[in-house]
């Protein structure tokens, strides 16, 4: 059953999973990748009665949503937040018994512009924002409102994001406000990025706002995604899903019409079907029996990567969950003060800050050593907060991920491969197939739900 009002074609409240008793399996299915995408696929396929094996290269589950230790605190390796409009995520949390545990907080937003830090957390603060004149502010607000009302996102794939924003916000607002943000997120790739990119961002954030002054209300699960992933693993194990960790895949080859997974560190396994959730370039490398066209399409998907620092601190910064930066010369693309959302009690009374730098292929930042990144990022943070001392920072840790989000270039949706492939028994379900949304947990879970409804095993 499909909810036609949902732009993705389904809703978590209307998904119908064919169910069989758990003891009556039909096929042996492997899922390569233990992020939220793979976990959701595993749960849904097990509910259908399939025999499911979940294979993850890392020694832990979670992928981009995994947790790690910063100082003495265990929290998410990258910053995540749940919005009230994230219906797919909330549906999964409900199944795991976590929905009632969620904490919902009204957050504040900051902007560092012309060497000063401003609060732009509500309408009145936005109207007082000095770097833009009154006409620029109304055009900026009108652009965001227009983006929130557009339904036909495919038309936006035919115009660059810079042309669309300039048309509606004006040249001055684009250069002073939008351009620094686009460069910080996309680098020079913003020139090739379609207007669908800003549409998806506006749609998600606009949906998160409540009434009144349109303050943002964001949520998190106590314990962070470490707690969510533990609960998810417990549920899958109780449903007899075989979870295999620390098993990097070397290749998936064809043997008499059945996929065989060859591993880097142990004997190969044969399955009836395999679902690959790895990023497009990795999928192109390991799925050796794909057609040349499929492998080329996957290899040509251009990704944004990330270099993200986690800082455990004694003190808060500006109290803004997100601080956007429009000034040039910063080594990071924004400041995410997680403890402006998460109760510091969750962090042993400390404060947690993320400093992300989104990188495109060839960005030298990705190759810098941790101590070099630490020196650069601390210098940039002290530029924003001159009273910050080294002793305020208890721990500093760097995460690098090469493939995070596909860059939505012009006409991107027309190049996306279907779930089914020419390699017998192999299906692709990965981030490159998210065509009308930004990469986040909710979109990832929605992709898994769509795949389960679409794929005929």
Image (tube, rainbow, N blue to C red):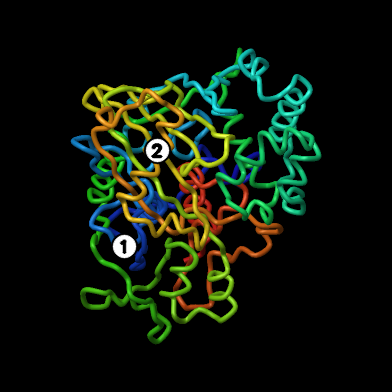
Front-most of residues 32 and 127: 127
Front-most of residues 358 and 28: 358
- Which image quadrant is residue 182 in? top right
Closest to the camera, between mark 2 and mark 1, is 2
Residue drawn where x is 71% and y is 26% of the image: 141
Residue 289 as seen in the image, left or right of residue 167:
left
Residue drawn where x is 29% and y is 44% of the image: 397
- Which image quadrant is residue 287 in? bottom left
Q: In this figure, which residue is indicated by the disc labeled 2? A: 379
Residue 26 locus on image (x, y percent)? 36, 65
Q: In this figure, which residue is indicated by the disc labeled 1? A: 51
- CA distance for labels 2 and 1: 52 Å
Front-most of residues 448 and 117: 117
Q: Using a 10 Å C-alpha cutoff, classify the residue at mark 1 as few (fewer than 14 neighbours), some (14 to 19) or many (20 or more).
A: many
Mark found first going from the N terminus, 2 or 1:
1
Q: Secondary structure at mark 2?
A: helix
Front-most of residues 278 and 96: 278
Residue 390 locus on image (x, y percent)? 28, 32
């Amino acid at each position: 059953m499909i909810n036609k009002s949902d732009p993705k074609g389904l809703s978590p409240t209307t998904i119908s999973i064919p169910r069989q008793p758990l003891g009556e399996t039909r096929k042996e299915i492997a899922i390569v990748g233990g992020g939220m995408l793979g976990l959701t696929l595993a749960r849904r396929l097990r509910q259908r009665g399939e025999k499911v094996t979940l294979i993850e290269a890392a020694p832990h589950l979670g992928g981009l949503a995994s947790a790690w230790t910063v100082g003495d605190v265990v929290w998410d390796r990258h910053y995540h937040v749940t919005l009230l409009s994230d219906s797919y995520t909330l549906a999964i949390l409900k199944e795991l018994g976590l929905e009632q545990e969620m904490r919902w907080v009204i957050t504040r937003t900051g902007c560092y512009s012309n060497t000063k830090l401003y609060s732009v957390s509500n309408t009145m603060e936005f109207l007082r924002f000095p770097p833009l004149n009154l006409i620029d502010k109304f055009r900026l607000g009108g652009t965001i409102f227009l983006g929130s009302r557009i339904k036909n996102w495919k038309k936006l794939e035919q115009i660059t994001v810079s042309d669309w924003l300039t048309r509606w916000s004006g040249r001055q607002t684009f250069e002073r406000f939008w351009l620094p943000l686009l460069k910080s997120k996309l680098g020079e790739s913003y020139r090739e990025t379609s207007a669908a990119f800003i549409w998806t961002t506006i749609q998600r954030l606009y949906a998160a706002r409540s009434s009144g002054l349109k303050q943002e209300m964001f949520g998190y699960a106590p314990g962070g995604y470490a707690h969510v992933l533990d609960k998810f693993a417990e549920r899958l194990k109780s449903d007899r899903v075989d979870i295999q960790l620390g098993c990097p895949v070397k290749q998936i080859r064809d043997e008499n019409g059945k996929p065989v997974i060859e591993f880097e560190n142990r004997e190969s396994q044969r399955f009836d079907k395999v679902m690959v959730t790895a990023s497009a370039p990795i999928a192109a490398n390991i799925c050796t029996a794909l057609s040349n066209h499929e492998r080329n399409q996957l290899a040509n998907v251009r990704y944004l990567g990330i270099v993200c620092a986690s800082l455990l601190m004694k003190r808060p910064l500006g109290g803004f969950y997100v601080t956007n930066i429009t000034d040039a010369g910063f080594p990071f693309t924004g400041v995410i003060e997680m403890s402006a959302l998460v109760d510091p009690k969750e962090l042993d009374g400390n404060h947690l800050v993320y400093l992300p730098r989104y990188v495109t292929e060839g960005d030298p930042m990705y190759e810098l050593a941790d101590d070099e990144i630490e020196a650069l990022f601390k210098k940039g943070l002290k530029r924003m907060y001159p009273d910050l001392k080294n002793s305020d920072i208890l721990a500093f840790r760097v995460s690098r991920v090469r493939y995070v989000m596909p860059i939505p270039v012009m006409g991107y949706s027309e190049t996306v491969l279907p779930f089914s492939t020419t390699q017998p028994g192999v299906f692709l379900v990965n981030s490159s197939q998210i065509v009308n949304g930004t990469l986040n947990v909710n979109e990832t879970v929605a992709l898994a739900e769509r795949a389960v409804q679409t794929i005929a095993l």
